[in-house]
Image (cartoon, grey):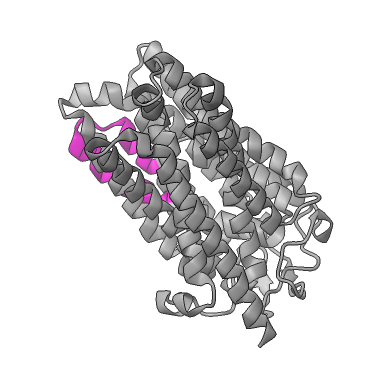
């Protein structure tokens, strides 16, 4: 039964990725149909991001009130309704309205599921689950492309994804009893680092790093916690909390800026053709998806902190290759290495949260981490666009390098604060 629950969680992560790339795929058709400027997609993106940030900040309260299973099922159902709303929309204003429940649903399920997996499953599953997100994000444009090339229109592309989300919602609702029944309260390793896979069973039972700092008992089913939800002020007062939030912000700045601007950098600065640049830019996403699959196996030997440092080293190597003026000779491996380096960082930071901050605080911390991530997604790629427009697109690798250095320093500072706190 627990293996079945894990399979359902894998499906949920695929579904998380399915809608994420739909707007970009459909927008070249939508903006012409609605007679709005090309840039108006940014308005919809900002509304979705705003809703996601808000629901991520509320995830601790929601999960403790209703449990992970119910929050996941409800959030996916809300996302399905929003996607169906997109499919019947015939104006830009309607898309903006439906973007709000879309963002609210996405943030809650993301934070709740990530926390549940961090508490109950081995690090390999966190990497592979985020690989599943990449598969979903890659499949979304193909589904939209099928609808468009078949003459069905972009509305039907959204409807296909909405139907898939509704089916998943039904599966999640039926599976709610699978989330019930287990309780755990185990000691945290003294060093606070994530243990290897032998510390957790594939069935989802946690053996030696479940209870953190406070020793709070968590019900695995619905993720209900007997403690009160933490306020933002209380979260900020936790040693290392501000640093890990800023670490997430920097990471997502690197990931999203690379995804959005790598192609433009290759065309405008390195002189590649648009077709070649588009193909090379896609290597970044291939690197992330493949890297997360590979990372699952590496976690058998490496802990979360080691995986994060390995990822940072690979990103650094990739950025240095992008700085070299040799066109595809260095751009090809550079973008792959940046993608491979990004792959383990996001899931490893999330997976290490219960070990670093305590399972009683992990949902709150993961919620604010998600909010920080989406804030970075929302603000920092446009900031680079502003810099590229007013200074030069050649700043691209330097921009990434600055945030990589800051991220590495902040993560190290967070670990030092946690170690000092435990020595008190």
Q: Residue most toward the bottom?
A: 424
Span of residues in magenta: 81-106
Q: How many marks?
A: 0
Which one is in front, 201 or 89?
201
Q: Is residue 169 left or right of residue 100?
A: right
Q: Is residue 278 above or below residue 98?
A: above
* Image quadrant containing the C terminus: bottom right
Which one is in front, 312 or 71?
312
Residue 63 in view in this figure: no
Residue 328 at x, y percent in the picture = 51, 20
Q: Name the dominant secondary structure of the magenta segment.
A: helix
Q: Is residue 121 above or below residue 257?
A: below
Residue 137 at x, y percent in the picture = 50, 33
Q: Residue most toward the top?
A: 150
Which one is in front, 154 or 114?
114
Residue 85 lies within the magenta run = yes
Residue at figure coordinates x 50%, y 67% from the top left? 243
Q: Is residue 288 left or right of residue 56?
A: right
Residue at figure coordinates x 74%, y 73% from the top left? 188
Q: Residue most toward the left?
A: 35
Residue 317 lies within the magenta run = no
Residue 68 in view in this figure: yes
Q: Is residue 231 left or right of residue 193?
A: left
Image-quadrant location for residue 273: top left
Q: Is residue 74 left or right of residue 44?
A: right
Residue at figure coordinates x 47%, y 63% from the top left? 245
Residue 102 at x, y percent in the picture = 37, 46
Residue 2 at x, y percent in the picture = 75, 52
């Amino acid at each position: 039964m627990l293996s079945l629950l894990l399979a359902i969680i894998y499906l949920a992560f695929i579904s998380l990725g399915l809608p994420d790339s739909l707007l970009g795929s459909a927008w070249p058709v939508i903006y012409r149909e609605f007679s709005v400027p090309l840039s108006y997609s940014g308005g919809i993106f900002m509304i979705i991001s705003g809703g996601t940030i808000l629901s991520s900040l509320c995830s601790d309260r929601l999960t403790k009130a209703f449990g992970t299973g119910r929050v996941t099922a409800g959030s996916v159902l809300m996302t399905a309704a929003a996607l169906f709303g997109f499919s019947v929309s015939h104006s830009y204003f309607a898309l903006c309205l439906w973007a709000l429940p879309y963002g609210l649903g996405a943030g809650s399920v993301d934070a709740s599921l990530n926390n549940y997996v961090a508490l109950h499953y081995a690090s390999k599953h966190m990497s592979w689950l985020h690989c599943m997100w990449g598969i979903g994000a890659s499949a979304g444009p193909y589904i939209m492309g099928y609808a468009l090339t078949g003459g069905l229109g972009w509305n039907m592309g959204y409807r296909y994804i909405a139907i898939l989300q509704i089916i998943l919602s039904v599966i999640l609702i039926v599976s709610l009893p699978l989330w019930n029944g287990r309780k755990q309260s185990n000691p945290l390793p003294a060093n606070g680092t994530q243990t290897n896979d032998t510390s957790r069973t594939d069935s989802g039972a946690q053996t030696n790093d479940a209870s953190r700092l406070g020793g709070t008992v968590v019900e695995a089913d619905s993720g209900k916690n007997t403690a009160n939800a933490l306020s933002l002020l209380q979260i900020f007062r936790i040693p290392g909390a501000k640093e890990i939030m800023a670490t997430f912000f920097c990471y997502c700045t690197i990931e999203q800026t690379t995804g959005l601007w790598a192609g433009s950098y290759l065309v405008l600065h390195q002189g590649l053709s648009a077709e070649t640049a588009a193909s090379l830019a896609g290597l970044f996403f291939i690197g992330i998806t493949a890297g997360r699959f590979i990372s699952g196996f590496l976690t058998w030997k490496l802990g979360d902190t080691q995986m994060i440092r390995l990822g940072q080293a690979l990103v650094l190597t990739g950025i240095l290759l992008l700085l070299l003026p040799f066109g595809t000779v260095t751009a090809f491996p550079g973008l792959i290495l940046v993608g491979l380096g990004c792959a383990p960082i996001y899931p490893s930071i999330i997976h290490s949260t219960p070990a670093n901050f305590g399972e009683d605080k992990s949902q709150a911390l993961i919620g604010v981490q998600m909010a920080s991530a989406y804030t970075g997604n929302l603000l920092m790629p446009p900031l680079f666009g502003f810099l590229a427009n007013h200074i030069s697109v050649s700043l691209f690798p330097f921009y990434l390098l600055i945030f990589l250095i800051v991220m590495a320093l902040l993560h190290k500072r967070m670990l030092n604060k946690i170690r000092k706190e435990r020595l008190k």
